[in-house]
Image (spheres, rainbow, N blue to C red):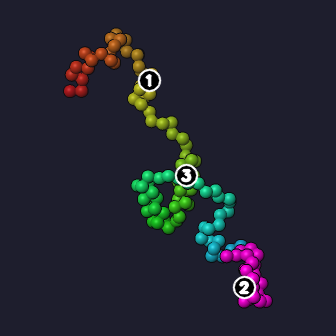
C-alpha cells in the first residue's frame, strides 16, 4: 500500500509526490497493526472449548485473539511460581512416626482399618 506506486499510477498522478515511508501517525498505526517491537509468529494448538473461550473474551473486550494471548502469557509468566499442590503427607511430614507405642504396620495392615470411617 505504501511506497512508490507503479508506472501507470505515476502517469495518472503526474506531478504528485508519493511518500517512500508511511506517515509516523495515522489510522493504520493506531489499530495495532504495527508493533513497537519486533514480533515473531508462533502456532498454538488449543482444544475447541479453550479456543471458544478465547474468541468470546476477545470479542467482549474488542481486542485481537493474539493480543489477548500475549497478555495472558505475560501475566502467567510473571506470576510467582506456585510451589505445587501440597499433599496431606507434606503438611504432616514432621509428625510422621512421632507417636510412640503404635504398631509398626498401622498404615498398611487391613485389620487396623476395620470400622474406620463409619
Q: Which residues are magenta?
A: 1-22
Q: Main secondary structure of the magenta part?
A: loop
- Identify the residue under disc 2: 8
Q: Quadrant of the N terminus?
A: bottom right
**Residue shown at 50%/52% (left/top)?**
45
- Pick whichever of labels 2 and 1 is earlier in the sequence: 2
**Residue shown at 53%/49% (left/top)?**
76
Q: Are marks 1 and 3 in contact (CB under 8 Å)?
A: no
Outermost front residue: 8
Q: How many numbered markers are drawn?
A: 3
Number of residues whose C-alpha sits closer than 10 Å to that of mark 2, classed few (under 14), some (14–19) or many (20 or more): few
Establish if 22 lies above or below 61.
Answer: below
- Identify the residue under disc 1: 93
Which of pointers 2 and 1 indicates the residue nearer the eye? 2
Residue 14 falls within the magenta-colored stretch: yes
The tag on residue 71 is none
Residue 113 in percent (x, y) is at: 26, 20
Residue 69 in percent (x, y) is at: 53, 56
- Mark 3 secondary-structure assignment: helix
Q: How many angstroms separate mark 1 from mark 3 (CA)?
A: 35 Å
- Mark 1 secondary-structure assignment: helix
**Residue shown at 44%/27% (left/top)?**
90
- Pick whichever of labels 3 and 2 is earlier in the sequence: 2
Q: Quadrant of the C terminus?
A: top left
Residue 48 in percent (x, y) is at: 42, 55
- Mark 2 secondary-structure assignment: helix
- Pick whichever of labels 1 and 3 is earlier in the sequence: 3
Residue 88 horizontal side relative to residue 7, left or right:
left
**Residue shown at 42%/31% (left/top)?**
87
- Identify the residue under disc 3: 73
Residue 74 falls within the magenta-colored stretch: no
Tell which of 110 and 18 is nearer to you.
18
Amino acid at each position: 500500500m505504501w511506497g512508490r506506486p507503479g508506472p501507470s499510477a505515476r502517469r495518472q498522478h503526474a506531478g504528485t509526490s508519493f511518500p517512500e515511508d508511511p506517515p509516523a501517525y495515522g489510522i493504520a498505526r493506531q489499530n495495532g497493526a504495527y508493533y513497537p517491537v519486533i514480533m515473531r509468529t508462533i502456532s498454538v494448538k488449543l482444544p475447541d472449548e479453550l479456543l471458544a473461550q478465547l474468541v468470546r473474551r476477545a470479542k467482549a473486550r474488542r481486542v485481537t485473539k493474539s493480543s489477548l494471548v500475549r497478555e495472558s502469557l505475560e501475566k502467567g509468566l510473571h506470576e510467582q511460581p506456585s510451589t505445587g499442590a501440597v499433599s496431606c503427607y507434606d503438611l504432616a511430614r514432621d509428625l510422621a512416626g512421632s507417636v510412640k507405642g503404635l504398631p509398626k504396620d498401622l498404615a498398611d495392615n487391613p485389620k487396623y482399618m476395620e470400622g474406620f470411617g463409619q
